[in-house]
Image (tube, coloured by chain):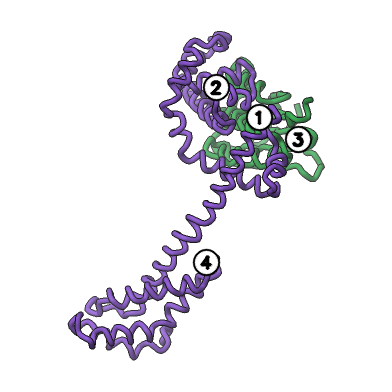
Chain colours: A purple, B green
Amino acid sequence: MNPRGGYDHLAPLFEQFASLPKDSPEHAQLRERLVTEHLPVAEHIARRFSHQGAPLEDLAQVARIGLINAVDRFDPAHGSDFMSYAVPTIMGEVRRHIRDTSWAVHVPRRLKELRLSIGGAVTELSQRLGRAPTPSQIAEHLGLSREEVFEGLEATNAHHSLSLDYLLTDDPDSASLADTLGADDPELSVVDAREALYPLIKRLPERQQKIITLRFFGNLTQTQIADRLGISQMHVSRLLAKSLDTLRASLSSDG
Amino acid sequence: MTKPEQPDPSGDEIEVRIAADAAQLPMLRAITSAVAMRQDYDLDSIADLKMAVDEACSMLVLRAITGSLLTVRFTPKSEIRVVATVLSDSDDWPDTGAFSWHVLSTLTDSLEAGVSQGAADPGGHVLWIELTKRNALGDE
């Protein structure tokens, strides 16, 4: 059984290829022959990956580069045969290409743009309506389908739950913001001292204290708070969720 | 008393059963968000409902028997009704003086909680919480 097809006759050539001086014309000639004769392997691998959305011609190019690299780097002295070295090398090259171009850049870029336009629409519509818009209103405003808006809103959530929470709360402007709002919150005085909640809220970053207080003791909506603090509703939403997590954690750890 | 045992025959009801474990809450947040988005709730109400479900389920999970299940049923109609239940060793529920309760009542339009007797096997108490959230647009 030879699953590798008709390439066995090329195997001895690699010994010869390795022994030729790198700058000799024979070396260059043999290199070309080895690459050319193995081209169907690259082609085959490119085809295998083409259903993932990248254009076949791009993949074939990348696979050929992978093949050239494999021919150049293969060392027959290591005992393995060329195919078992070349196939993973070429596949690695193709995978990296798909990852770098069509996936990690393409799809998220579309979502990123979607996210940005939804963010803009939310701000604009909130101002016009005096309250947070619904997905339908956002969809209508942007000329998108509701499904697209859902997708964008979900991407927003997913995106922010990863890292921005931390970045945003450590935002250096939060101190100056709190300054302008005054350090002593009148709303906070209504907080029940039971459960020692007051000191826990006081331990939160100033902006989060403010938001918690306005939302739960001043009964403002997220959009109203966002307005008042000059940040987005989504930002308020994230900070509120984060604050509640913190409070919950400290309440349960304090018994 | 029998709240957890009243299934709604309407077609748009969603019931989720997951481990009563805080690590599962992000999953519930995602589902809650999807339910409210698809009811075309405004973004404030979506965010409120997400937080409310998160808070309610956090309260339940804290009291749940280790290794038991948290059941959450969403009934989206003119308002979204969410009923969450866990099995607990204790029937000391709910603590309406807690901050969590205050948070919940701020975030929701109606809020109720109680205890019903668990099945003879495995026993225990069924803690339930029911909350509803209306689309803020319907308020005016």
**Chain under label 1?**
A
Identify the residue at horizontal 50%, vertical 58% (top origin). Answer: A103
Alpha carbons under labels 2 and 3: distance apart: 38 Å
Q: What is the x, y in percent for residue A62?
A: 42, 71
Relative to A63, is A218 above or below? Answer: above
Q: Residues within 10 Å of mark 4 (few under 14, many from 20)?
A: some
Along the polypeptide, which appears first: circle 4 or circle 1?
A: 4
Q: What is the x, y in percent for residue A223?
A: 63, 27
Disc 4 versus disc 3: nearer the observer: 4
Q: Are dots 2 and 3 on a single chain?
A: no
Amino acid on which disc 4 is placed:
Ala
Alpha carbons under labels 4 and 1: distance apart: 42 Å
Alpha carbons under labels 4 and 2: distance apart: 46 Å
Numbered circle sitting on residue A211: 2
Residue under label 3, please give it: B5
Amino acid on which disc 3 is placed:
Glu
Q: Residues within 10 Å of mark 3 (few under 14, many from 20)?
A: few
Alpha carbons under labels 4 and 3: distance apart: 51 Å
